[in-house]
Amino acid sequence: MNSATLTAAKPETVAVDLGERSYEVRIGRGLLARAGEEIVALAGKRRVAILTDETVAARHLPALQAALAAQGIDAPALALPAGEATKRWERLGEAVEWLLAQKIERKDLVIALGGGVIGDLAGFASAILRRGVRFVQIPTTLLAQVDSSVGGKTGINSPQGKNLIGAFHQPALVLADIDVLGTLSPRDFRAGYGEVAKYGLLGDEDFFDWLETAGPTLFADPIALQRAVRQSVQMKAGIVQRDETEQGERALLNLGHTFGHALEQATGYSDRLLHGEGVAIGCTLAFDLSARLGLCSQEAPSRVAAHFVAMGLPSRIADIPGDLPDDEALIALMGQDKKVQDGKLRFILAHGIGRAFVTDAVDPQALRQSLAQSRL
Ligand SMILES: NC(=O)c1ccc[n+]([C@@H]2O[C@H](COP(=O)([O-])OP(=O)(O)OC[C@H]3O[C@@H](n4cnc5c(N)ncnc54)[C@H](O)[C@@H]3O)[C@@H](O)[C@H]2O)c1
Ligand SMILES: O=C(O)C(=O)C[C@@H](O)[C@H](O)[C@H](O)COP(=O)(O)O
Ligand SMILES: [Zn+2]
């Protein structure tokens, strides 16, 4: 990120208003260095334990530990292997046993320093440790800053499907320091962008219009990046406030995920397909299916695909390297989706860009045609 020539906006705060589970999301530059003060303000000088991954630990853990040490807090850390494969029982067990060995008590704090994998796993570990301890999200990927650190969905994957084991457990604070995104690989940055675009596609056409121009500049422009993170978090916070446990509206945040999660399972939760890449392919499929069902214009899916291509993201199943299960097997994998009701798949489709809705009225032939088209 070109921080020398561009000044950034001031840090901003988005409140997530959930009664006694309310918290704030701070977004801006230099927040990692101020983490010690934030943690003391939240929990005094209580004990703190950090869960992270090995890649993030090498780049950003010393700065966090120094910020905490400056406030007199000695914070031990456990660094798990980086990558989606870490979101599983064995690593969860390792994390929980380690937290117990650190004697983390109910009123102490767990810090998740990392991307969505660490945030989801650390959040779930915090939910079940002594039946619930507080945790703070310090998201270090674009995906985690715009999406996974907010809203309290925590959990791990199963061989049967994505995020099938988990709990709702809201963080006590989120510190999204956009400076730390400067060390992300271009591929991980782009994957996170898949979730940014999702917000425009599901509920805000003006945001999507802006992203079509600003998207390619985000990595180098902290002002545009902070705006993208803030608008995404504002949209997610609004939805989560109205529907914390996904009884209705929150399912819109799953746009593209019925497809994406099945593809992630089919690729073994490996780096063949990152979560945000699956979301980009899934969003394109959702718009293609919507157009086939006559719900939106034919232009909408082309515009969605064109934007993902312009951003260097995959937009078709054919973009995934290696062999994949056939369409019937992919549809069977979708059967484990958490939105399934009475055995029936439910999809997030759209009447146009920014106009998503939930439906179970999907012609299976149209679904098969969309999947077949996406393989070409
Ligand atoms: N809970 C939710 O609401 C929610 C929302 C969206 C996604 N998710 C989950 O999030 C996960 C994906 O998250 P992700 O894309 O952040 O993946 P990730 O956590 O695996 O991070 C991606 C890669 O970036 C590396 N990394 C992280 N921060 C870095 C930094 N600052 N500099 C350099 N490298 C860095 C990591 O080590 C990893 O290799 C998926 O499991 C997905 O299901 C959850
Ligand atoms: O917060 C939500 O709600 C979301 O659906 C956000 C998604 O981006 C995220 O990937 C989430 O983990 C998917 O939820 P799931 O319930 O399908 O596992
Ligand atoms: Zn997602």
Image (cartoon, rainbow, N blue to C red):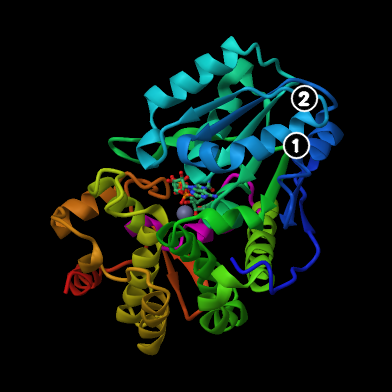
Instruction: Name the residue located 50 percent from the left edge and 77 percent from the top edge.
Output: 216
For the image shown, how many numbered marks are present on the structure?
A: 2
Which residue in the structure is indicated by mark 2?
73
- Indicate which disc residue 53 carries: none
Residue 236 at x, y percent in the picture: 63, 58
Ligand 1 contact, mark 2 (Cβ < 8 Å) = no
Give x and y (percent) for residue 305.
36, 78
Range of residues picked out in magenta: 243-259
Residue occupying image coordinates x 57% and y 22%: 128
The image quarter in which residue 210 lies: bottom right
**Label 1, label 2: how far apart the Cα atoms are:** 9 Å
Q: SS at mark 2? A: loop
**What secondary structure is marked by label 1?**
helix
Q: Amino acid at mark 2?
A: Ile
How dense is the environment of label 1, judged by Cα within 10 Å: few (below 14), some, or many (20 and up)? many
Quadrant of the drawing holding the N terminus? bottom right
Give me the disc on residue 67.
1
**What is the three-letter code of the residue carrying label 1?**
Ala
Verify whether residue 246 appears in magenta: yes
Name the residue rendered at 64%, 41% in the picture. Answer: 137
Q: Is residue 372 left or right of residue 137?
A: left
Q: Nearer the viewer, residue 278 or 2?
A: 2
Give how far across and how far down residue 49 sits, in percent: 64, 24
Q: Position of residue 56 (x, y in %)?
A: 52, 41
State the residue at coordinates (16%, 59%).
Answer: 327
271 left or right of 376 in image: right
Q: Is residue 21 above or below residue 97?
A: below
Image quarter of the C terminus: bottom left
Earlier along the polypeptide chain: callout 1 or callout 2? 1
Viewer-side residue, 342 vs 299: 299
**Residue 83 lies in the magenta stretch:** no
